Amino acid sequence: MKKIILIFCLGFLFCGCTPIWTPYNIQRNFAGNNININGTISEDNTTITIKKVSQNKNSYTGAIDIGISPPVQEMTGQFPIFNHRIIFTTEKEEDFSFIVPFNTPKLLIVIQTETDTLKLRLSNKIL
């Protein structure tokens, strides 16, 4: 038993002491596509990955605007927001990944096309 604990501790030290986990995972249907959104928190930021799977030939293709923000603090006068644009093509499956400068346990995200809007609240299930 002591060997297992020692191996675990050494592995933890060699792999890094920086906490990294995937707290955000949400699936939705958006503009005729199934999307899966994951977030991985690291030291000072969060990596967002989006996987798109087209449902059929008529699924939306084109620009997708994404806005991400931590919840607004009471009357601080600051509203940090990160904007990003991705393009859905005619490929059946696509993966997108980008880094946002927030590592908060909750994020607000708005995903928008010319005609459709999806608003989500992502919560860290681990914290």
Image (tube, helix red, strand yellow):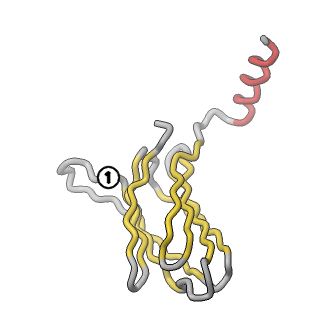
User: In the rendered view, would you say 70 is above or below 50?
Assistant: above
- Residue 117 versus residue 16: which sits nearer the camera? 117
| In-image side of 28 versus 96 (left or right) | left
SS assignment at label 1: loop
Above or below 90: residue 14:
above
Q: Residue placed farthest to the left in the image?
A: 75
In the image, farthest residue toward the top: 2
* Residue at 21% across, 50% down: 76
Res 15 quadrant in image: top right
Q: Which residue is located at x 46 percent, y 47 percent?
A: 103
Q: Residue 71, how many percent across, how many down?
A: 32, 52
| Whole-percent x, y for residue 59 in the image | 56, 83
Identify the residue position indicated by label 1 in the image.
Answer: 71
Residue at left offset 42%, top offset 44%: 105
In this rendering, the count of numbered labels is 1
Residue 21: where, in percent of width, then height? 58, 43
Pinpoint residue 12: horizontal percent, then vertical percent: 70, 29
Q: Residue furthest front?
A: 56
Mark 1 crowdedness (10 Å alpha carbons): few <14, some 14-19, many ≥20: some
What is the quadrant of the N terminus in the image? top right
Query: Viewed as shown, does residue 115 lie left or right of 20?
Result: left
**Vertical comparison of 5 with 75: above or below:** above
**Residue in the image at 62% along x and 72% along y:** 53
User: Disc 1 marks which amino acid?
Assistant: Pro
Judge from the rendering whether residue 80 lies leftward or rightward of residue 12; answer left or right: left
